[in-house]
Amino acid sequence: MSRVSQARSLGKYFLLVDNMLVVLGFFVVFPLISIRFVDQMGWAALMVGIALGLRQLVQQGLGIFGGAIADRFGAKPMIVTGMLMRAGGFAAMAVAHEPWVLWFSCILSGLGGTLFDPPRAALVVKLVRPHQRGRFFSILMMQDSAGAVIGALLGSWLLQYDFRLVCSAGAALFIACAAFNAWYLPAWKLSTVKTPIREGLGRVLRDKRFVTYVLTLTGYYMLAVQVMLMLPIMVNDIAGSPAAVKWMYAIEATISLTLLYPIARWSEKRFRLEHRLMAGLLVMTLAMLPIGMTSSLQQLFTLICLFYIGSIIAEPARETLGASLADARARGSYMGFSRLGLAFGGALGYAGGGWLFDAGKAVGQPELPWLMLGAIGLSPSWRYGGNSVRNALPPVCWSRAPDARGGGFSCFQPILLARWVLTGHDALCQDEGRYELEEPHEKDIDRRRANCQRPAERL
């Protein structure tokens, strides 16, 4: 095995361990925030929604700056610092008895995520070859689901004793993750060139294709974040016990572990990425519309199952599309900006969802927030259903699909570009203590993209 292949292989194992620690630390605390402050302390759902929305807006909205700084200084210092800040946010949350303290803790937690999330995403793009990314993202999602269940179970068990124990467990996991990164993560550069912060930001903002794609996802994220706010509240209201929330995450884990990878492998050979994303979003929307009219836990869990199925169809396609569009010269900046749709959608989903939930309860129409969110979720489907996104995205972003002529493959596939670009070109070099998995010059990539206009050879 060559040195670069060994580096990539070990890097994937590192990413999996790191991801599990982050997921556990997050899901020990965040799914229980709405239960703690709305159901146990009697706060308005709007207050908690604002707190969760602030965390989402800060972490994802400022992610482009965190990514640009990581492009300049490397991934390791940003990741370690951000995880320690997240641990500090959890410590502040443990003593939150006023809304402003909860808001402060969520902002601090979000600032930590601003620092560690974009470089972690850029490391995935750096270490995983393009034709392997879809499946690797599926594995990460399966791990996310398993970690969510374990974290929610641990958090629910600790909540029986004291919410401070919940926050302490989350903080301890992020401190452990910071130590793991400080000890094992090499001083890798994220980009193929040492990009100044301003240049990295400008490169992303000038990329209209990428900006259009990211902002179009706002409606999708407004639905997705309800797993942290309204779905736990709904489960708790119908079941009458916060312990039932763990079964919601158990359903997610079961579906992800059994269906996510097979669906990803089957669909990547037959459908374009944007069609998979649109189909998943449509399923999520149809599942969310009738939730407010359910009266039994069985009906609610059935709709939650449908919602999760839509999510596992959409998420791998969304991640792969975003990674395919990233410019190798500013990976951190691109991965940071890719979170902007989540920032807007998450903030609107949390704050708007909390306000709609309170309003629906006040007027005796509990189905109001679900119908409104479902209608909003349909808007990205119209966007993806037309030709605008196809025209906005370059050929390398399409999923692998059989060529209509029956011979070879369509040029809309990252696997072909990966064979052209990466084979024989990777090298492991050392530059002032920073290790880099070198890739060909961007002009070479552009030339090979141009070759996509010619019939593709069978691999």
Image (cartoon, rainbow, N blue to C red):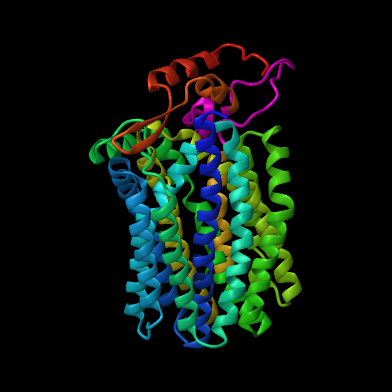
Q: Is residue 408 magenta?
A: yes
Residues 126 and 385: in front is: 126
User: Is 456 placed left or right of 85 in the picture?
Assistant: right
Give the residues in magenta: 386-414
Number of marks drawn? 0
Q: Position of residue 424 (x, y in %)?
A: 51, 19
- Whether residue 148 sits left or right of residue 126 in the image: it is right
Relative to 426, is 237 above or below?
below
Residue drawn where x is 54% and y is 14% of the image = 453
Q: Is residue 18 visible?
A: yes
Seen in the picture, residue 441 relative to 208 is either above or below; the reply is above
Q: Is residue 111 magenta?
A: no
Please report the residue visible at 70 percent of the width from the left and 19 percent of the height from the top. 404
Q: Position of residue 144 (x, y in %)?
A: 59, 57
Q: Residue at x 73, y 51 (%)?
A: 259
In the displayed structure, 235 sits above or below 114; it is below
Image quadrant for the N terminus? Answer: top right
In the rendered structure, the answer to whether residue 419 lies left or right of residue 335 reads right
Q: Position of residue 381 (x, y in %)?
A: 57, 45
